Amino acid sequence: MKLLSNYLKEMKIAARGFYFYIEIAMAIVLLAILLLAVSETSTSNRKQFIYNDMPQKIAEYLKDRSIEKGEARLADSTEFKLKPAEFEITNQETGKTTTYDFDDEKIVELETIEMLDSSTGELDETVYYVETEADMIRLAYSESEMGVTVVMNPYGKVSNKYYLQGYETDRLKSLLYILQNESRDVVNAKKDKQVVRTIEVTETLNNRENLVPIFIAYMGSLMGFFIVMAYIFYDKAEGVIRAFAVTPSSIWKYLISKIFVILTTVVVSSSIITIPVMGGQPNYLLFYIFLIITTFAIASLGLLVASFFDSISKAFGVMYAIMISLMIPAFSYYIPSFDPLWLRFFPSYPLLQGFKEIMLNGDAGYVLTYSLVFLVGGLGLFILADIRFKKTLTV
Amino acid sequence: MINKLFVIFRKDFLTARRDAMATYIMVIPLVLAVGITLFAPGLNDTTVKLAMLKSDDIEHIEYMKQFSKVELFDNMDELERRVKKRDDIAAIAPNGNSYEIILQGNESEIVEEYAVLLNTYYELGSTKEETTAQLISFGRTVPPLKTMLVNILILMTIMLAGMLIAISIVEEKAENTINAINVTPISQTAFVVGKSLFGSTVAMLGIIGAVLITGFYDINWLMIVLVGLTSMILSLVVGFLQGLSSEDIMEAAGSVKLLFLPIAGSIAVYELVADKWQWTMYWSPFYWAYKANTMILSKTADWGTVLLYTAMVIGLSLIVYLVSLPKIRKGLS
């Protein structure tokens, strides 16, 4: 009963301030960004500058054939400004170095072709055809993109000269070496014969849906860490916490009522983002269980950290360092091939993966296991925070 | 006037030293820079991973190792268990006289495409030795991912300065020291500039240290300082606005998120969105700062472009400053 009255009192105070409304407004802004600015399909930004060292007619024929086969589509021509530049290039095989020094400035308009993904038909790479090799090298240098000279010998055999930036991995370089060893038709015929077996029937999130776990985890659960600390420091400055030393109410009820206010805010703001984007796809029961438990656990961590400092400015370093470190697993979320073992020890790793599973209506076992882990961890942190606050309270 | 500015600067420096705030603004970017230095090589080398059987033909395994990271397993059960794990990995395993590619089913398109392509070239007997291709290098050693992380770090440090201004103003309000300024010979402008001077000096030192730690020694330092200082104007103005308009630390904490939006949006649009949609972020000074920093860090910047982008940053920041000036004045009164 006391807990409920504490919570209602805190909610009334929160409703009087602007913070609660800022959170709601932020959720609406993020929802608008997701629905209006983020497309469902991802777009590729990869570019390549090509100079065709072959008769014009053959070059045109090869381009037209790609377009007819649906491998590419013609786009509007693109303007590039070439600025004065001085640089060196080194041939990796011969070690020969050539220096280029361009003093002039000019604008070139390049024929542009969009290469399409064979299975999805989406943009894979934008290719610009350059009229001279010197301009192609200059563009590859200034735009920091790959340049290619496609050379055709009198027997019709094609070989490529790749202009690389220098930081490419050895594995990519090895692949470039073998790419032109066989004709495209031979490669495609062999590719079609490859047997691909899929072990599980799994759903994937589209480009827009893929952002929802990030927004929920970072703007919701993890923000609870920052906000609960701000709440505590505000009350410390006002002397509210100290007043608990002379009241019959226990400190844990005060602390949990703060967490409940954050839980209310996070549940409302996360629902604003999730429901319109994901519709009926997620398992909402699991979603709210996981959201509430993880927010509780991370807010408890915030309480524990707050118990060691007097003001937010003193706690800022620790707070900022924890928040930044919790952001690191986002790299693995976006680049699934990058998944080192050490990254899995960050609490935000299962947090992101858990929300992803919920959005996919996937592995409920994973979500429930980590819900239990966060619950136990959160309770432990909460008990420690309670002990710390009791110790530091003096009349 | 200059004297009074330095009085504020010195006061803030002493207060901040007590609260270790200055240390945070300077040390946090340095710690993050060390993190980037350790972290970036692994992140850059995220080639597709392949799972194979130890019993597979050694020549096949060695072939694949030239193009991907290969993990070896004792039997098919282990191989399939590995494929089912959370990260993206494809398996290539013997299947009769040929090979099959095994996927979990939720991998990105590129993983399947790459595995199929590699096995195709293996079956065609394609080797590096018979290549007709030539590789020519511009000799750049810093990968774009590292440049991006350092650039994000610069903007985060700038945001940090704004956040700290907001928090310090709210704390000054709570202690009533803001009102006290009005009865001293220090003008409101001197107070604003003095406080900003402190925040920007400390943040700039943090940025320079971070750029040095991450190995960007031979960039144009004048350019990076110019872009850093100008892009800090907006962060500081917003910091002041948030600090002065927030009644308490709760509101300041909530509105700090608002500063995060244009910064994150600018980076996301520049890095992820197609050229034809770049104009959607032209209103954000952070977009121009990020663009300028990318060019400076990748050593492709020229003074004409940097000055143009700096002018955009200053122009847009001044518009925000002039619009919010009455609010700042009111807040200080």
Image (cartoon, helix red, strand yellow):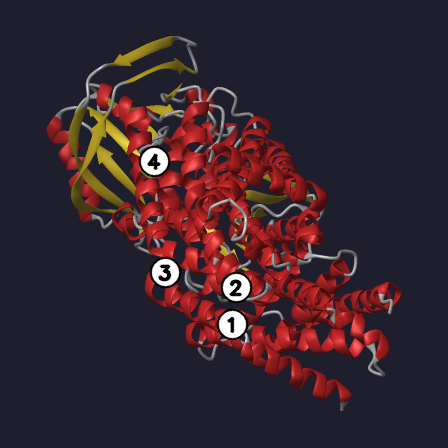
Task: Decide: few, some or many residues near mark 3? Use Cα within 10 Å; few <14, some 14-19, many ≥20.
Answer: some
Few, some or many residues within 10 Å of mark 2 (<14, 14–19, 20+): many
Q: Nearer the viewer, mark 1 or mark 4?
A: 1
**Mark 2 → mark 3, Cα distance in angstroms:** 32 Å
Disc number at residue A18?
A: 1
Q: Please name the amino acid that badge 3 sits on.
A: Val
Q: Nearer the viewer, mark 3 or mark 4?
A: 4
Q: Nearer the viewer, residue A14 or B54?
A: A14
Report the disc number at residue B246: 2
Residue at (53, 44) in percent of width and height: B195
Residue underneath mark 3? A38
Label 4 belongs to which residue?
B310
**Callout 1 amino acid:** Phe
Q: CA distance from mark 1 to mark 4?
A: 35 Å
Percent x, y of residue A239: 74, 69
Q: Label 3 to label 4, Cα distance in Å?
A: 28 Å
Label 2–label 1 contact, CB within 8 A: yes
